[in-house]
Every structure is written in C-alpha cells, then in structure tokens.
Amino acid sequence: MFYQPGKTHHNLPFDPFKACVVPRPIGWISTTSPLTPASPSTQPTHNLAPFSQFTNLSFDPPYVMFSANQTPEGFKKDTVRNVESTAKFVWNLATWDLREKVNASAQQFPFEVDEFEHVGLEKEFSSCLPGDVQNPVPMVRESPVKFECSYHSTLRLPGASVMGGVDLVIGKVEGVHIADWALSKEGKLDIGKTKPIARCGYYDYVVLDKTFEMVIPGGDKAILAGLEGNAEQAQQSMGRPPDEQTLPLPKSRLRSGSDTGRQAPHVPLVTAANDLFGNIDPSLTTFGKLSHHRLLVSVYLMLQLPLRPSFYIFKSSAQPSLASITKTRAFSPSSPANMKLLYPTSLVLDPAKITGFPTLTLHPYDVKSPTLPSEHHDAEILVTWANSKDNLTYAVKNLKDLKWIQSLAAGPNDVLSAGFDASKVKITTGSGLHDRTVAEHALGLLLNAARRFYEMRDYQLQGKWPGHLGGPQPDREKGTFRTLRDARVTIWGFGNIAKSLTPHLVALGATVKGLARSKGVRDGIEVFGEDSLEDILKETDALVMILPGDASTKHALNRERLGYLPNHAWVVNVGRGTSIDEDALFEALEGEQIGGAALDVFETEPLPEGNKLYGAKNLILSPHAAGGRPQGAEELIVENLRKFLGGQELKNII
C-alpha cells in the first residue's frame, strides 16, 4: 500500500503512522508552575504528564527532547507552559511497576490539579536547577531514573488540525538520578530490573526486560564511545583534556528567566575554533578572505556564543589564533534595561501568566480613553483589543518608540486604519484566538435557521402558538433546509475557524465542502478553488462565509453569485461584513430567491437604526457577537514575546 498523509487515505481501519515507529520511549515529564512576582508566597502547582514522542539528542553534553501536541481547544499543554516559564523540567523513567499511574497521569486535568496527588505518587525534588531553592521541580520518588533538565528552546511545528500543532521542547540534562538497585554488578543500568515501558502503535505498549549486544566491526574508539554515550572517553580519544573539548553551549534566545551564571570558558572555544579552521593566517582581516567552509564554521561558532546579556565578536590579530575576543552589547529589539508592554483593560488578562521576562514591565491602559498616559509614551509593545479609534490614533502620534503591536482581534483592520505602518512597526493579529467561539456561533446560527427557532420566537412575542412548526414533520422535505443531517454545507474561506466548525457539522450528519483560493484536502475535507464556485453554490443548502476583510473579498457574494444558490439555501456570515453585497442580499431575501440569511457582521457597524435589513424576510441578525472572547490570549502574547526577544519571525505577523 502507499498513501500520502493529508492528501490520500490509507484505507485502513486504524492510522498506521505511529505504529511504524516503535517502540518509543515515554517522556514522563514533571514540572512546576512559576512563582509570580505579585504573590511569591503562593504555592506553585505541580504537573506530571507522559509524552510518547521523547528521546535523547546528544550525550556530550546530554540533551533530551519531548514533543507536546496542542490541546483539543488549541492551547499549549500545561507542561510546555510551565517549562517555558520556569526554564526547567524533570524526566522520570516510566516502568512496568508504575504503568497504571503513568496512564492515569495522561488524563486532561485542569491546570490547578496536581497529578502526583491525583494518581497517588510520592514526590522528591530537584536540587541543581535554576531557582530550586524557592521553587524546585517535583520528581516521581518511585521512578528509578530521573533527569533534572534546564530548558534550552522550543521548536513550534505547525499542524493541519487544531491538535496537530506541536511544541518540540529541548532541555539540557544537568543532573542524573539512578537508584542503586537498578545497577548491575558490572555497573550498567539493568533494564531487567527497571523494566521500562514504551509506546507502540494505537493503544499498545511494550515492556523491555531483555537486551542483546552488537558492536560495529572495526570500531574506532571515538565512534564506539559516541555510540555508548561515554563523553569522557569520546573526549580522551580525540587527544585533548576534557575541559578543552567542550564548546560553549548555546543559550536559547527563547529561554525565559535569568541566566544561571554557568558559562563555558572562552579559551577552549578559541582552541576548538582553531582546530576547525586550521591555523588562521594573521594577515586575514575580513571574512571575505576565509574559504567558504571556514566562513560557515565561524558564523556557526558565533551563533553558539551566549546571546544574553552579551555576545562576542572575533577580531583578527597578529597571532595565529582567534585570540582577541571583544565583548559588545547584545542585539535586542530593545535597548533600554526595562522594556515596557501596555496591555488593555478591555479584556481580563492575567499578567501573572506573562512571566519569565526579567526586563519586561507590564502596564494596563484604558482602550476607550482618547489618550494614553504620558509616562507610557516610551512603550515598545502595545497589546490592543476593542480600542477606540481615537485611542489608536493617539498611539500612532505619540508612541514613538513602539516596535510591535499585538492585536487580539482576528484581523488588523482597526490597527491599520488608525494609521500604523506595518513596514515600520511589527503588527501581529489574534488569528486563532477566536476559532472556537466563532465556530460555535456559526453552528448556532445554522441550527437556528434549520430548526426555525427565529420563527418560533416571533410567534411567541405575538402571543401565538406556532402549530405549523410542531407535531409530526416531514423527515426531510425536498427543497428545504430543515436539518443539518444530509445537508450540503459549503464553507467559503477554509481556515482555522472552518477547521473548528467542520467536525461539529460532520457529527450532525452534514456533508461539508470548502471553497478557498487554493484547492486541496484539509482535515479530511475537500476544498475547491474559486474557479469551481458556481458549480459548488448550485449544490449548497447552507453557505457559511468566513472570508477575511480586504479588497480581494469585497462583495465576494454579489447579485450574480447569490443567483447560483438554490431558492431554499441559507447564507451565514461570521467573517467580514464587506464580503456580502447587502443591497443584493436584501433583494434576494425579499424576492424569496434564497431561503434566508443569518448575519453576525455588516458593512457598517453598528447597523444604523432604520436600516432595511432589520425588516428583511427570514433574516437572523446578531451584533458581531461570534468572537469577542479571545481564547488563550496570554499564551499567544508569551509565545510572540519569546520570538520578538529572540529576533525570530512572529506568529500571525501581517
């Protein structure tokens, strides 16, 4: 068999992918929530969860990684949030004896639940990680092997579905705990005693209790030492003392918290650089005279140097080595000692969740005020949500140091219309924060239209009994939209909101198709290009519009395209009001050319009093209420803060 994930189906009752890569070690990761500056006496929350994508990455020094998919709601896992906020975690070996508790700790608990207590595990605590005196990481006492790890970095992998998004977290092993009883007489870790368990495919696990040995024929000492993972022998086999073998380890630009002070000496770096380059001609004064591969190595070495709070630049000298190293100021988007972030009071944000940035200060502001306090005119980061036009216009004129705007709205329209220039100030949106709420609202409007709740409400207000809507009803009257079961639903604008809505529609029996600029298969739904628009609309019972608001989508649903729809079809719009020609829609409703419309957005908002749409036939009106409640705003702000401080591409940047 052959299949292409996301494009063609494997035609098997179970997805085979994970079953192909087995067995997989289990990352049983324990973490602690951060102590907040506002309430340092508050007890942190302890967390424990298993991850089936886990492995070691290197041995000299040792690094490990685990990957965590997003929650079904589209949020980062609690484990990832804790690691990024405290810069530490512990890996605990999952064993046969602990298998039931490993499985029980995998449940999706609320953040405040302590999995140790819930599943009945005793704790001991880390002792060599940053901040362990005030806030150590809990470890599983019964586990025979534990790694204390400092946080290195997170690699964010995009997903084709909500849960498909994954955070790959890397940590450096700072301390190793091994129970004495788990060691053999030869001094090896005895898996016959520890009996580690591992994930296979589906819901299958395996327990390991036997090994066999194979040694590469003619193995070089350094290679064999590497395969064994023996750092000391690997260093000695290269002919130099161990302390001259280690390059300075990269301090992640994504890492939160202050530096620990543990830093590799500079001289071994110079030695290693000369070993890689060969002897450098002292007459060289520019990188341009270095050979191509030496240039790459030099750039690589500089990237490995500590980037916070300073970095180092190599200078050529009269000596045949990189002997002169000049300390200079680190590049940062911000030069002041304290970077100022303004956050809106129009949303209940939890500042305690925006932690791990020692040079960042947070300041609330009133989005409805026509001005901003003068003491905050030096702010470099502005978070916006439901700001008044005057407020944003004032910010354009007075926040001269502004470098980045994080809007929590799905689109940047209000920020751009105020006059901010995206070529001078980074602008990111809240795309993704409204997926679930907008999807829920769209589903509600569809059910309202199909089950005619709006008509029942009209009769209620008139004090009349809508008998024609009750009692025995046709199962599915031909040429009507009366149920989502077997209904042909077309979603125009197939992005993240559509991906959140589609599973609910499918669960209720609808047949879903997508329309977008590019065709393909997304989350198992066939999406057609707009060149197929006419044919798709002609076979649509309900059209859900989730288009963005820009010049390319203005009046996308016009008089001609409304004419393609069957006369029983409903139009639902939870995208942007400008995507529908409202005059043409009104005519179609009045002439009963379509079944009805349910609109949450309009070209002019609020919809002016006396507007003809208020009295249109079969029109359900909601006051731009589909979004309005950003979900996971703090997580997005923190993620983009890390990227911003690290000089990386920001999420949702326009």
Image (tube, rainbow, N blue to C red):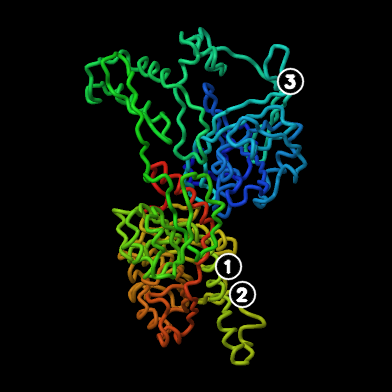
- The kind of residue on which mark 3 rests is Asp
Q: How dense is the environment of label 2, judged by Cα within 10 Å: few (below 14), some, or many (20 and up)?
A: few
The residue beneath circle 2 is: 475
Say above or below: 29 vs 281: below
The residue sitting at the bottom extreme is 463
Foreground mark, 3 or 2? 3
- The kind of residue on which mark 2 rests is Asp
Residue 199: image location, x then y, percent = 64, 35
Mark 2–mark 1 Cα distance, whole angstroms, equals 10 Å
The residue beneath circle 1 is: 485
Say above or below: 162 vs 602: above
Q: Quadrant of residue 179?
A: top right
Q: Secondary structure at mark 3?
A: helix
Q: Is residue 230 left or right of residue 370?
A: right
Q: Nearer the viewer, residue 288 or 95?
A: 288
The residue beneath circle 3 is: 180
Foreground mark, 1 or 3? 3
First along the sequence among labels 2 and 1: 2
Q: Is residue 570 visible?
A: no
Q: Is residue 200 left or right of residue 334?
A: right
